[in-house]
């Protein structure tokens, strides 16, 4: 989890980016060397930044020119990359089709909002994905909608980690099917229309909220 004191906050986003790089690198190395069931094996990675404040561009995913939305960062990422998302409100549907680590700056203020129009907020199609420090809110309020959807009909997804997230005001919180080795920890999942977590064919699931 990322903690910054008042001194760094006052100096603004530009002043803390070097510190972010160091902290993210340390956390990622911890994930690499102490993974859940060897979920992440890559030791070569990039850090790609997302900031909704960068409205006018340019956008290349660097700390100086972050992408404006999460999907552009995912599209540009390689397997094993870290996508760091600054605090803000991101109204979008994101398909995670790369083995990446999605990290929000602060789970209370890094919000992906479905605006009550999206059936899914984040869809995970591949193995070896982690999501942490986000609020995922306001999908459509039906049993067929969910904040996080993890399923691929063609193969079994492995090694998914969801931690330190707020998941509320959705249809379902998390939907899992054809998945093995999943960890859901320190998540606040509440006030959803249907189930907080709905698991179909799932093996080796660990939940500690």
Image (tube, rainbow, N blue to C red):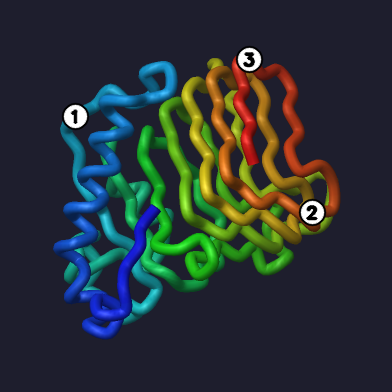
Crowding near the residue tagged with mark 1, few <14, some 14–19, many ≥20 C-alpha atoms within 10 Å:
few
- Residue 19's x, y, as percent? 18, 62
Q: Quadrant of residue 97?
A: top left
Q: CA distance from mark 3 to mark 1?
A: 27 Å
Residue lying at 58% horizontally and 36% vertically, measured from the top left = 184
Residue topped by disc 1 = 43
Left or right of residue 110, residue 82 in this image: left
Say whether disc 3 or disc 1 marks the residue closer to the N-terminus: 1
Say whether disc 1 or disc 2 marks the residue closer to the N-terminus: 1
Left or right of residue 12, residue 1 in this image: right
Q: Secondary structure at mark 1?
A: loop
Q: Nearer the viewer, residue 61 or 84?
A: 84
Q: Secondary structure at mark 2?
A: loop
Q: Quadrant of residue 168?
A: bottom right
Left or right of residue 186, residue 39 in this image: left
Crowding near the residue tagged with mark 3, few <14, some 14–19, many ≥20 C-alpha atoms within 10 Å:
some
Q: CA distance from mark 3 to mark 2?
A: 24 Å
Cβ–Cβ under 8 Å for marks 3 and 2:
no
Label annotation for residue 191: none
Crowding near the residue tagged with mark 2, few <14, some 14–19, many ≥20 C-alpha atoms within 10 Å:
many
- Residue 51's x, y, as percent? 35, 69
Compared with 56, 123 (above or below) is above
Left or right of residue 180, residue 85 in this image: left
State how many labels appear. Answer: 3
Residue topped by disc 3 = 203
Residue topped by disc 2 = 192
Residue lying at 52% horizontally and 43% vertically, measured from the top left = 163
Q: CA distance from mark 1 to mark 2?
A: 37 Å
Q: Secondary structure at mark 3?
A: strand
Cβ–Cβ under 8 Å for marks 1 and 2:
no
Q: Quadrant of residue 114?
A: bottom right
In the rendered image, the quadrant that contains the C terminus is: top right
């Amino acid at each position: 989890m990322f903690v910054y004191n008042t001194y760094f906050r006052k100096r603004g986003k530009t002043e803390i980016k070097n510190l972010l790089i160091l902290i993210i690198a340390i956390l990622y190395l911890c994930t690499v060397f102490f993974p859940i069931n060897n979920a992440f094996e890559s030791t070569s990675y990039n850090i790609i930044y997302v900031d909704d404040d960068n409205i006018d561009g340019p956008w290349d995913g660097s700390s100086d020119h972050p992408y404006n939305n999460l999907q552009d960062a995912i599209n540009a990422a390689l397997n094993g990359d870290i996508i760091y998302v600054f605090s803000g409100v991101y109204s979008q549907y994101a398909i995670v089709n790369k083995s990446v680590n999605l990290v929000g700056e602060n789970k209370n203020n890094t919000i992906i909002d479905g605006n009550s129009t999206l059936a899914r907020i984040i869809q995970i199609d591949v193995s070896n994905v982690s999501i942490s420090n986000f609020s995922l809110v306001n999908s459509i309020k039906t049993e067929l909608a969910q904040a996080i959807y993890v399923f691929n009909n063609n193969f079994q997804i492995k090694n998914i980690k969801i931690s330190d997230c707020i998941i509320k005001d959705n249809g379902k919180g998390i939907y899992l099917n054809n998945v093995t080795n999943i960890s859901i920890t320190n998540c606040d999942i509440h006030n959803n229309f249907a189930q907080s977590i709905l698991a179909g064919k799932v093996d080796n699931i660990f939940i500690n909220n």
